[in-house]
Image (tube, rainbow, N blue to C red):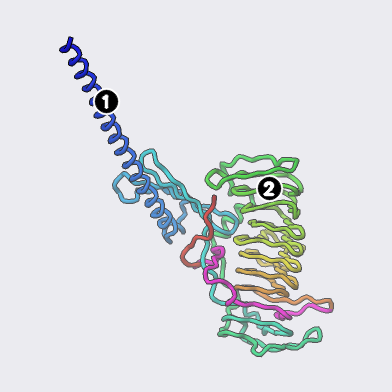
Amino acid sequence: MLKSSTLLYSIAILLICGMIIFSLILLAFYHRQDFYENYNRQIVLKNLESGVNLLLSDDIWNSQEDTLSVDLFNEGKDSAILKKRMWGLYKLGMVTSFRGKINYTKVFLAGSQAGKYALYLANQNTPLSLSGLTSIVGDVFIPKRGVKQAYIEGKSFEGNKLINGAISESETEIPRLSEKLIEINHKIINNEYFINISEQQLPNRAGTIINSFLHLPLLYRHEGEVILKNIVVRGNIIIQSSDSIYVDSSAVLEDVWLIAPVVRIGNSFSGSVQIYATNKIIIDEKSKLNYPSSLCLIVNEVNKTEKEIVLKRDVVFDGTLLAYSDQQQLIPPSVSLEKGCMFSGYIYVNGQADIKGSVSGTVICSKIILKTSASVYENHLLDAIIDRGKLSPDFIVCPLMINSGKPQIVKWMQ
């Protein structure tokens, strides 16, 4: 009886010891698995940063390829997929890094640093004339005939110095846009850019539309006028109309792209948008377009009426503004900043700029005009401010020029 009970105790102890040993082996196995998984995750995250830096390199960023698959270290273990496309006037980059079954993705908006000068005015043999409380701070490129004081609307120049910066002679043409940007913009306007994207129907009632930049864009294309009212639209979403788009102040838009012949933003709207138009963009009074917004007016046919971008009184805008035509026009595209308008960023127009507000940044234009109730003056500024020094050195604008400099990240996208 004693021997049998001893045997049972021995078997029980062996079973318990076996279970403990098995548990320890299993624990070590899972610990090892967890260690290697965490190790691989850290490797993938480091590779993700390497992929972002690689995509932002000049050779790849400026290449014709929009999608690249790369072996980061030529060992067959660490791979990344690099993608880039336009989002408004900015470029959208996407990097996916993977090792085995582990993968991570980052999406970002990129641009380039703003020009270092305050004003580039094409040399069309007309001097720049300043009146009232006009202030220009920063280096300028102006016509050969230089800058002078003028008396307009009962006001003479009231400043201490005409230009607070270095003065250089401009060329007869303003710096050219990137040919690739012009090519892509024409594809966008002619509905040739958004391929392999399914079209959606805009909801007829108030609601919320959200789409992550980790997914394919949602394209809402509509024949006729689009009115965005009492609606929330965020993220990777394009709204396109064959006629016009009106955005009411009750709408909430963030990072959305609007495309139509005419786009109008209603009074007191606040949000961030990318806007493309072929006829007119109007930002109504007291609206605020947050960084990084962009407005792009593309004139792709001979003008019979004025094509313009208008920022009305007390508008606050942070971003990039572009108005251009790639052919000679009897009525050139124009940009107008009304009194009280506060613009931070970069303005490029190969036509006319009417600056009555304040610009913290850079203005590049073929001609400056001043419209008053009495007359229209050429290359005149009245009570206008153009101050390059007020723009943050970290401010990144859309990469418009052929040599825009090294691309830099504007914003990480969700």
Q: Secondary structure at mark 1?
A: helix
Image coordinates of residue 88 in percent, x first then y, are 60, 56
Question: Could you tell whether 24 is left or right of 323 in the image?
Answer: left
Assess disc 2: are there few (<14), some (14-19) or many (≥20) residues with their C-alpha within 10 Å of its C-alpha. Answer: some
Q: Secondary structure at mark 2?
A: strand
Task: Please tell me in which quadrant of the rendered image residue 168 appears.
Answer: bottom right
Is 387 rendered above or below residue 179?
A: below
Image coordinates of residue 373 in percent, x first then y, are 84, 76
Amino acid, disc 1: Met
Image depth: mark 1 or mark 2 in front: 1
Q: Residue furthest left?
A: 3
Amino acid, disc 2: Val
Image coordinates of residue 230 in percent, x first then y, are 74, 48
Count the labels in the image. Answer: 2
Q: Residue at x 75, y 88 (%)?
A: 156
Q: Is residue 375 magenta?
A: yes
Image coordinates of residue 351 in percent, x first then y, are 67, 70
Is 120 rendered above or below residue 182?
A: below
Query: Magenta residues, as a range?
Result: 374-403
Q: What separation in Å lies between label 1 and label 2 (alpha carbons)?
A: 58 Å
Please state, as top left, top right, bottom left or bottom right, where the N terminus lies in the image. Answer: top left
Label 1–label 2 contact, CB within 8 A = no
| Residue carrying label 2 | 232
| Residue carrying label 1 | 19
Question: Could you tell whether 313 is left or right of 388 in the image?
Answer: right
Q: Is residue 215 magenta?
A: no
